[in-house]
Image: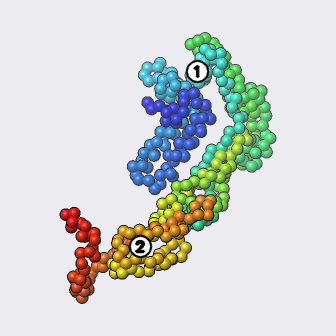
Amino acid sequence: MADLYGILGVSKQATKDELKSAYRKLAKQYHPDMFSTASEEEKKKAEAKFKEINHAYEVLSDDQKRAAYDTYGNENGPVGGGGGFNWSSSAEGFDMDDIFSTIFNSFTGGGRRRGSSANRAVRGDDIMATVTITFEEAAFGCEKEIKFKRTENCKYCGGTGAKGGTAFKTCPKCNGTGTVNVTQSTVFGRVSTTTTCPDCKGKGKIITEKCPNCNGKGRNVETRTINAKIPAGIADGQQMSYYNEGEAGINGGPNGTLVVLIRVKPHALFRRQDYDLYLEMPVTMTQAALGCTVQVPTLTKPVEYTIPEGTQSGTVFRIKGKGIKQLKREQYGDLYVTVIVETPKSLTKEQRDLLFRLESTFENKQYPKRKAYKEKL
């Protein structure tokens, strides 16, 4: 079986927070939205990696599955005859995580207090949203309205799940501590462990009347809209982060982050590389031979440029400062124009005769590339 710790890039001693942090980072990196313009092969590889990451986190973030994986290399427990033992729970209602905790306590004198984190403040998850803009909008900046759904604490009960935020009482089973002591029979004898209270799930309180707005969940999915100010010079694939706009935190924890992925539509004429623009401009063979002044398009207005006589196809000219504005700087890239000399098609008989007559007047020195080629032959 694959090394689940290696997949997430963490050690076997990693805490739950470390696991979650590693998972979030990798999930963002291999999220399908990040490969929307990639090749099919790259998409398949990213999809497989994304599934692998999710599986690793699903196992290691679950105490039972992690304990079984650490012991047997398989989150489902030992393979083969195991006497029909159910690894999720025994006939007496305790799970394997309790047994591992007991063994750990017996040999080390320490251990963990389960249920102590039920009321811990937890930061909300991040949300990924994608916005598509035009080439010009990316070059000059724009403002876009982004709608997205996120989980928010119920405003009617303050996230408690109780009607009016007050319809709850102290749990009588654990007296509000969220944990209870359980005595279990194990292969090492009868031992006591501290576990999460089954009645209040570690909260220390029980709802007496559910909030009618969220049905006792304390959270609702809401649609939120923000106006995203996209800066001039942003490129395809870049991200913008809006802190505190992600999923709502738990138990008073801060909201997560909204991460906006920018997708830029291609331009009909220009190709972008960093902050420079590239353009292919066709000219006639007469213009290239005699030289001419052409109107070169830019993202604002055309500029005049003089092409010298004898210009060859593929020659590149640079027009300074007519590229993309640099992010957070008042500097611009350049525009690179590649001249493409176009040969006319469908000539008339008169045109062919004129070209033959013209060709007969040329000397070898007027074709230096052809002359050099013949010499190399």
Residue corresponding to mark 2 = 281
Q: Position of residue 128 (x, y in %)?
A: 58, 51
Q: How dense is the environment of label 2, judged by Cα within 10 Å: few (below 14), some, or many (20 and up)? A: some
Q: How is the image coloured?
A: rainbow
Going by the numbered disc 2, the residue's amino acid type is Met
Quarter of the image where one finds residue 129? bottom right
Tag 1 secondary structure: helix
Q: Position of residue 355 (x, y in %)?
A: 25, 83
Residue 100: give its label: 1
Distance from disc 2 to disc 1, alpha carbons, whole Å, reads 72 Å
Residue positioned 25% across, 67% down in the render: 372
Residue 289 against residue 42 in the figure, above or below:
below
Residue positioned 68% across, 22% down in the render: 194
In front of the other: 78 or 360: 360
Quarter holding the C terminus is bottom left
Quarter holding the N terminus is top left
Tag 2 secondary structure: strand
Left/right of residue 83 with respect to residue 152 in the rendered view: left
Going by the numbered disc 1, the residue's amino acid type is Phe
Residue 80 against residue 327 in the figure, above or below:
above
Q: Position of residue 217 (x, y in %)?
A: 68, 42
**Residue most toward the front?**
365
Residue 186 against residue 7 in the figure, above or below:
above
Residue 59 visible in the picture: no
Residue 39 visible in the picture: yes
Residue 45: give its label: none
In front of the other: 283 or 376: 376
Residue positioned 38% across, 69% down in the render: 315
Sequence-wise, which precedes: disc 2 or disc 1?
A: 1
Q: How dense is the environment of label 1, judged by Cα within 10 Å: few (below 14), some, or many (20 and up)? A: some
Q: Position of residue 197 (x, y in %)?
A: 69, 27
- Of marks 2 and 1, the one in the foreground: 2
